[in-house]
Amino acid sequence: MISKRTFKTKDETEVTFIFSRDDVKKVELVADFNQWQPSSMKFDRKNNRFTAKVRLPNDNIFHFKYLLDGKEWENDYAADHYLPNVFGSENSVVSTVTVNLAKS
């Protein structure tokens, strides 16, 4: 699951990545915004889930996946979109594109 908060005074969006599955002991966020280097997600005991907060530039899309216990790749089923990758599968995509619907 993904939640987003756009900062009005900054050109960035805070994205919270959330992953939950009972049989997993470690979850890492792997994405183009961290040069595809696994980044450990914090375990929230109260809610029994892993979370990571990242500030990303607005008006972009970013590919990501979760690496479970160092061996299993998983997409986020609440991602904004999915796009093919070079390994024959798909990456999850999060978008920080802001849309201004104000009339001129």
Image (cartoon, rainbow, N blue to C red):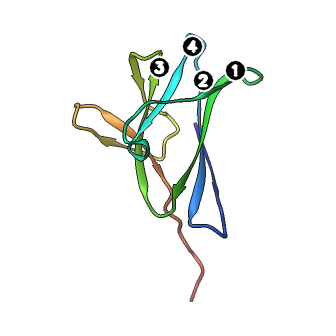
Q: Amino acid at mark 4?
A: Lys
Classify mark 3: residues with Cα within 10 Å, few (<14), some (14-19) or many (20+).
some
Crowd around label 1: few <14 · some 14–19 · many ≥20 (10 Å): few
Residue 81, position in %: x, y? Answer: 42, 46
Could you say which quadrant of the image residue 24 lies in? top right
Q: Residue furthest bottom?
A: 104
- Of residue 100 and residue 87, the one placed in the foreground of this image is 87
Q: Are marks 2 and 1 in contact (CB under 8 Å)?
A: yes
How far across and how far down the image is residue 9, in percent? 66, 70
Query: In the drawing, what numbered circle is on residue 20?
Result: 2
Regarding mark 2 in the picture, which secondary structure is present there? Answer: loop
Q: Label 4's element?
A: loop
Mark closer to the observer (4, 1): 4
> Eyeballing the image, is 53 above or below 71?
below
Q: Which residue is mark 3?
A: 68
Q: Residues within 10 Å of mark 2 (few under 14, many from 20)?
A: some
Q: CA distance from mark 2 to mark 3?
A: 11 Å
Q: Mark 4 or mark 3: which comes first in sequence?
A: 4
Q: Residues within 10 Å of mark 4 (few under 14, many from 20)?
A: few
Q: Which numbered disc, 1 or 3, marks the residue that appears first in the sequence?
A: 1
What element does badge 3 sit on?
A: strand
Instruction: Please tell me which residue is depicted at 56% across the width and 10% down the height of the picture.
Output: 23
Camera-near label (2 vs 3) is: 3
| Residue 57 image position (x, y, % from top left) | 50, 59
N-terminal label among 2 and 4: 2
The one of 101 and 52 positioned closer to us in this rendering? 52
Q: Are marks 2 and 3 in contact (CB under 8 Å)?
A: no
Task: Identify the residue position indicated by label 1 in the image.
Answer: 48
Amino acid type at mark 1: Asn
Quarter of the C terminus within the rendering:
bottom right
